Amino acid sequence: MHGDHDHDHHHDHDHHDGHGHDHGEGSHLSEMDLRVRALESILTEKGYVDPKALDALIETYETKVGPHNGARVVAKAWSDPAYRARLLQDATAAIAELGFMGRQGEHMVAVENTDKVHNMVVCTLCSCYPWSVLGLPPVWYKSAPYRSRAVMDPRGVLADFGVTLPAAQEIRVWDSTAEIRYLVLPERPAGTDGWSEEQLATLVTRDSMIGTGLAEVPVGNSPPNPPLEAA
């Protein structure tokens, strides 16, 4: 286990447990979802919350930020060795170079996956998460089962996500804190030589930047817009 967790979790995000690995199966709302919606309705009725402003905030993190910012960081690191070195040395500054900062991303650390080491991120006490580069945390990231099993059985958790690693490949689990957020730099997929940063970014998923997934070229797919041949 890497990362210190002797900190006070005074965050403005929830600390509730009780959610398993929800990958979209079923459309029923959990008890917590219902409570949140009921509270939102009450606050809206009393005039404390502007629904349009709330919708805009949620849309920003779900669609405009999402994992798109992080994907741009990863793609640049894959394409630019100098930027990759800066990212691994001082992720906060390197990410800020691209204009991404703040909102629980104040102090970032990038950890690099290789053929020998695979990194995975968890927050064992609540759900510390780099919103500025990954958007809203997924439900499963905040769940008690993930927070405990990621530490005790990371290989089993990866298997739950459909990721099977060689037995010889070390798995390192990093514990996010109120002071430090982690970004996994996944391995660049083979067969992507000559791809532009924009093309590479399409291969980077949220899960690959948490470490519960891999960046991969879809089977049978070529670059979305193949690069022009060099003159």
Image (spheres, rainbow, N blue to C red):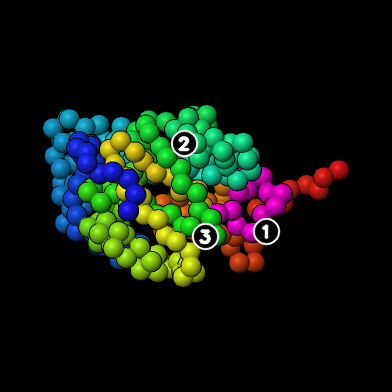
> In which quadrant is the C terminus drawn?
top right
Q: Residue at x 43, y 68 (%)?
A: 162
- Left/right of residue 127 with respect to residue 84 in the rendered view: left
**Residue 55: percent from left, percent from top:** 32, 38
- Residue 180 visible in image: yes
Q: Residue at x 21, y 44 (%)?
A: 14
Q: Is residue 114 above or below residue 80?
A: below
Q: Is residue 10 shown in magenta? A: no
N-terminal of the pair, mark 2 or mark 1, is 2
Q: Give the SS element for disc 3.
A: loop
- Left/right of residue 42 with respect to residue 53 in the rendered view: left
- Residue 37 visible in image: no
Viewer-proximal residue, 37 or 154? 154
Magenta-highlighted residues:
187-200
**Secondary structure of the magenta portion, mostly?**
loop
Real-space Cα distance between discs 2 and 1? 27 Å
